[in-house]
């Protein structure tokens, strides 16, 4: 067990950090308060403290812990620019964008947009949680009257935009199939890839990005840039019934015409924008919000295409520039007025284009990713635009993402081709630097001089070499803390402060990961279920084994061969193997129930829901080769247990 550092609490900001904050106050246009006016405009009502809980009383979302943000002046432990953004993200409730179009903001990290048609309401993005979506709908109904849901639209593939759909569509409505669920092409493929295939690792890394285990406060978590944090409720994925395939596609939904623009491989691998001529309203989803977005989030994802992102914004300007009188996104607050809208789109377009082109220019001069991050500076016209600040993404890590997209992780210097892993290299660094005491003596001097970035690098080697060295852990925690206090980016701050907390207190105790919801399983194609099973196969344990299983699903009329060979699990659709070890005939819905842990395989067999031919124990043998992924694993210190 890691030894915790007893009595260690968050510290004050160092003088060098306070000086950085003072310089930023002088450099940026804090006198410009237009965003505060826009964020509060046309407020209709809210839920007290935005408090949402489950039926059992577990809090899903609340802004009450953020009351400390009521002060206009930033404390020394928070970057003043981030403090400003954090206060803007405190506005919550139902807001009118234009008559007939409304947004619920501040009940989740994302927004729900509600568009009134001739008789019902069209819901755009359903927040993260089912509980949050229900609360948002009830808030809307309370102020606008109860209406039927005419359609649900998912603008893109991230969970905070579709996870609450079951809170919008009740069972009877969903089973009727009469309410279309509209999404961009390849929505399901990417929703599964980003949120399920790599889900276990992403969820752990997301704790650093969003800081859910940090205390809320001036020395802890204050924001995420896009909003406060991620909601903690129930999530279920629903399969779209209608896909938008191309820019220029139109739909008339409950009398309202939608003009769509495809934006794949921008903020999400499947994303789209739309314009409503009836309301002169433009919605650019998450591609034109009030911050410089992430090109590679800390949780992990496919690297996003900054050049394509810029081009989509340019195309949107060409299609709808001068037409829209209001523009809203699925995060943050709207913008009104044709000139202001067009200016914001142009600046966002040029922000991503500048970052892309200048990264490639410097890359072609031979600079590495870290060297480009040290060199690049935004032009003054973009640096002074509040919506271009790096609260969620940041130019210093976005340029590294651009470099990675083109050239990958390797900088071509052979020293970085096959370096030692952290523990082994840490031990050699400690040896070369004269031992732990010598490192700490030098590091404390540099810490006093405000050289936090190098102190973190040096002392991290010592922590990986000697993870129970309390002095090293304490100094690295203090260093991460100062880097967090200085950060303008909310994600940087959360990562640094959570790293400090884990060094001081160890990993937080988290409950076991719940089973995948049946609704989500039902939305997956059977091929996707086999893909998820394949990544759980422990290759070393499967050495020398061969298992062939036939599957027949009675309700979907599908057949599969599942094949374990060469330590890889593969499948063939629309086929059956003559030499199969066993065969299983069942409804696909029964398999969903087993995976969701609503029943067990033996119970389903005993109940007559599954029939078996051949040696059914071969399936049990296969399942014995599967890993269960831990919810928590070490990040800022060596792994205490590692799967083989």
Image: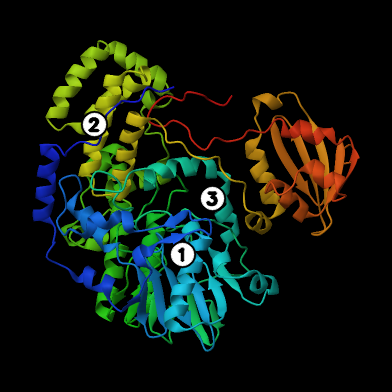
Residue to which mark 3 is pinned: 195
Residue 83 in picture, x, y percent from top left:
22, 54
Residue 403 in picture, x, y percent from top left:
36, 44
Residue to which mark 2 is pinned: 478
Cβ atoms under marks 3 and 1 closer than 8 Å: no
Quarter of the N terminus within the rendering: top left
N-terminal of the pair, mark 2 or mark 1, is 1
- Of residue 509 and residue 317, the one placed in the foreground of this image is 509
Question: Is residue 214 toward the left or the right of residue 237 in the image?
Answer: left
In three-dimensional space, the C-alpha distance between marks 2 and 1, rounded to whole angstroms, equals 42 Å
Closer to the eye: label 3 or 1? 3
Quarter of the C terminus within the rendering: top right
Q: Quadrant of residue 428?
A: top left
Circle 3 — which element?
helix
Residue 20 image label: none
Residue to which mark 1 is pinned: 263
The reply to whether residue 78 is visible in this rendering is yes
N-terminal of the pair, mark 3 or mark 2, is 3
Question: Is residue 92 toward the left or the right of residue 540 in the image?
Answer: left
Question: Is residue 269 toward the left or the right of residue 107 in the image?
Answer: right
Cβ atoms under marks 2 and 1 closer than 8 Å: no
């Amino acid at each position: 067990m890691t030894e915790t550092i007893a009595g260690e609490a968050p510290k004050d900001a160092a003088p060098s950090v306070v000086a950085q904050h003072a310089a930023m106050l002088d450099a940026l246009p804090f006198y410009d308060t237009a965003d505060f006016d826009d964020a509060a405009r046309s407020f209709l009502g809210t839920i007290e403290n935005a408090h949402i809980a489950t039926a059992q009383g577990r809090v899903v979302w609340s802004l009450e812990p953020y009351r400390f943000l009521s002060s206009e002046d930033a404390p020394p432990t928070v970057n003043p620019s981030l403090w400003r953004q954090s206060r803007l993200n405190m506005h919550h409730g139902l807001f009118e964008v234009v008559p007939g179009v409304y947004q619920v903001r501040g009940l989740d990290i994302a927004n729900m947009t509600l568009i009134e048609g001739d008789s019902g309401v069209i819901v755009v993005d359903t927040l993260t949680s089912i509980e949050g979506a229900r609360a948002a709908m009830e808030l809307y109904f309370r102020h606008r009257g109860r209406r039927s849901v005419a359609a649900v639209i998912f603008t893109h593939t991230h969970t905070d935009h579709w996870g609450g759909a079951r809170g919008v569509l009740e069972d009877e409505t969903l089973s009727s199939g009469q309410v279309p669920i509209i999404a961009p092409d390849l929505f399901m493929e990417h929703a599964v890839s980003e949120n399920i295939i790599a889900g276990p690792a992403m969820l752990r890394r997301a704790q650093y990005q969003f800081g859910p285990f940090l205390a809320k406060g001036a020395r802890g978590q204050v924001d995420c840039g896009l909003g406060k944090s991620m909601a903690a409720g129930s999530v279920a994925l629903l399969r779209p019934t209608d896909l938008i395939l191309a820019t220029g596609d139109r739909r008339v939904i409950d009398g309202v015409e939608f003009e769509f623009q495809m934006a794949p491989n921008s903020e999400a691998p499947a994303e789209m924008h739309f314009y409503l001529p009836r309301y002169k309203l433009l919605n650019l989803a998450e591609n034109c919000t009030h911050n410089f977005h992430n090109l590679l989030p800390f949780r992990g994802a496919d690297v996003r295409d900054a050049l394509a992102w810029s081009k989509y914004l340019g195309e949107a300007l060409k299609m709808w520039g001068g037409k829209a009188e209001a523009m809203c996104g699925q995060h943050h607050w709207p913008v009104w007025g044709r000139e202001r809208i067009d200016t914001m789109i142009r600046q966002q377009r040029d922000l991503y284009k500048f970052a892309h082109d200048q990264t490639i220019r410097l890359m072609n001069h031979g600079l590495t990713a870290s060297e480009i991050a040290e060199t690049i500076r935004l032009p003054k016209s973009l640096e002074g635009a509040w919506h271009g600040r790096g609260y969620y993404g940041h130019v210093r890590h976005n340029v590294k993402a651009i470099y990675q997209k083109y050239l990958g992780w390797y900088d071509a210097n052979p020293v970085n081709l096959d370096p030692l892993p952290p523990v082994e290299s840490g031990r050699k660094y400690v040896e070369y630097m004269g031992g732990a005491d010598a490192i700490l003596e030098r590091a404390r001097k540099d810490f006093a001089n405000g050289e936090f970035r190098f102190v973190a690098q040096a002392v991290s080697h010592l922590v990986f070499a000697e993870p129970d060295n309390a002095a090293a852990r304490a100094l690295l925690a203090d260093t991460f803390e100062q880097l967090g206090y200085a950060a303008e980016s909310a994600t940087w701050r959360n990562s640094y402060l959570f790293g400090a907390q884990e060094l001081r207190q160890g990993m937080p105790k988290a409950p076991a990961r719940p089973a995948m919801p049946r609704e989500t399983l039902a939305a997956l194609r059977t091929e996707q279920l086999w893909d998820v099973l394949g990544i759980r196969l422990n290759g070393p344990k499967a050495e020398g084994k061969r298992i062939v299983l036939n599957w027949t699903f009675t309700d979907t009329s599908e057949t599969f061969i599942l094949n374990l060979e060469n330590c890889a699990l593969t499948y063939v659709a629309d086929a059956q193997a003559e030499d199969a070890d066993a065969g299983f005939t069942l409804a696909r819905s029964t398999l969903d129930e087993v995976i969701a842990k609503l029943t067990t395989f033996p119970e389903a067999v005993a109940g007559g829901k599954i029939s078996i031919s051949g040696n059914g124990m071969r399936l049990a043998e296969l399942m014995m080769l599967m890993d269960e992924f831990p919810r928590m694993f070490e990040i800022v210190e060596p792994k205490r247990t590692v799967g083989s």
